[in-house]
Amino acid sequence: MPYLPLRSLPPRPISALSTAWLERLGDRLAKTSGDVPTHRAMVCRDTLAELVYPEYAANWEEAVNDEAVPLGTRLALSQLDPRNVTLEPEYYSDCDDARFQPVKPLLWLWYSFDRTPLGGQNVALGVALRRLLAPYIFKRVGANFKAFQHVEFTFGYNLEVGDDVVVHRHVLLDDRGGIRLGNKVSISDYANIYSHTHSIVEQADVTNALTILEDGVRVTYHATVLAGVHVNEQGMVGALAVATKDVRPYHVYVGIPAKSVRVKPNAPQPATILRTSEHRVERGASES
Ligand SMILES: CC(C)(COP(=O)(O)OP(=O)(O)OC[C@H]1O[C@@H](n2cnc3c(N)ncnc32)[C@H](O)[C@@H]1OP(=O)(O)O)[C@@H](O)C(=O)NCCC(=O)NCCS
């Protein structure tokens, strides 16, 4: 196979505008005083209003209540404020409102930006915005986090992300029971990572289980990892596979249910394969 690393592109001519816009947003988010959910709801509303309804951005409240403004426009304006919107996780009994309400405005901003003309496919600006929002939403996020458009979460607050993680377009990260992504994890387009499941008898009987993708794991296009599965270091889940059980380190699993079809040629000898980040830390400590 040819070696095709990503190219670097020169800065866009108007990159100063995006930098200024992101800096202003970052400053506003950092200056949280008082009620965090309210502050963030206002940041979300103002940001979206300026982008999609600039003529009403300065007088949002007045316009929403103004009968001279078309009804649909007033409705659309009202929905820019996350307090006027419900998100699916809010209906879940295990949703921790104390944790979800502060992240909800930022999830709404993330999802809504992706659906604007300037969002969506806009890689540089989109990645930078999501990188700015991620530390306020996730339990933890490492360096160089890169998310493309239309990624969705359940709670967001139950997601741990290591360094150099890439999440491609239309990925579902259902962190209801928790998701932990190690360093250099890559999740390809349309993949689904779940951390909750339902009883086959009683739909409302929900089991949450932490799902772990260890360092260097790749979950490829349209693949699904079910709740509680542990994909071990450098494991790979092939296109369209459904990982129902743990994936062994350096193994490539394909099919439904996913089974190992090969061990990567760069796998260390079995005795030295590091199974989890914890083992690696333990071994590092014992070797030093
Ligand atoms: C998982 C994958 C990398 C395996 O590639 P590979 O190691 O070269 O494996 P092979 O093509 O030699 O396939 C081994 C066997 O598994 C089968 N197989 C491969 N991928 C499969 C898949 N996604 N689903 C079902 N079966 C698959 C092959 O048909 C072959 O079966 P056979 O032995 O009966 O002929 C590849 O199939 C895949 O899914 N690629 C997705 C694209 C990708 O690389 N994405 C990375 C982005 S991060």
Image (spheres, grey):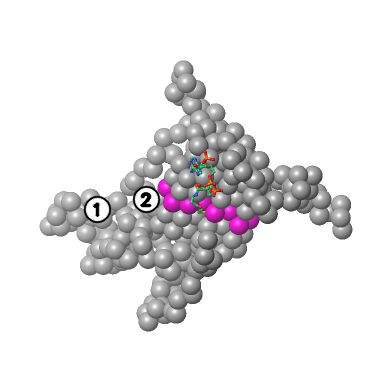
The residue indicated by pointer 2 is 82
| Residue 186 lies within the magenta run | yes
Q: Give the percent coordinates (x, y) of residue 129.
A: 45, 64
Is disc 2 placed on a helix, strand or loop?
helix
Q: Which residues are the magenta region?
A: 179-190
Query: 257 or 63: which is nearer to us?
Result: 257
Distance from the alpha carbon under mark 1 to that under mark 2: 12 Å
Q: Residue furthest top?
A: 201
Query: 14 or 76: which is nearer to us?
Result: 14
Callout 2: 10 Å neighbours few (<14), some, many (20+)? many
Callout 1: 10 Å neighbours few (<14), some, many (20+)? some
Query: 132 or 171: which is nearer to us?
Result: 171
Task: Write the residue at 76% across / 44% down.
Answer: 270
* Mark 2 residue type: Pro
Q: Give the percent coordinates (x, y) of residue 93.
A: 48, 31
Is disc 1 placed on a helix, strand or loop?
helix
The residue indicated by pointer 1 is 76
Asked whether the residues under the numbered discs 1 and 2 touch, taking CB atoms below 8 Å apart as contact, a structural biologist would say no
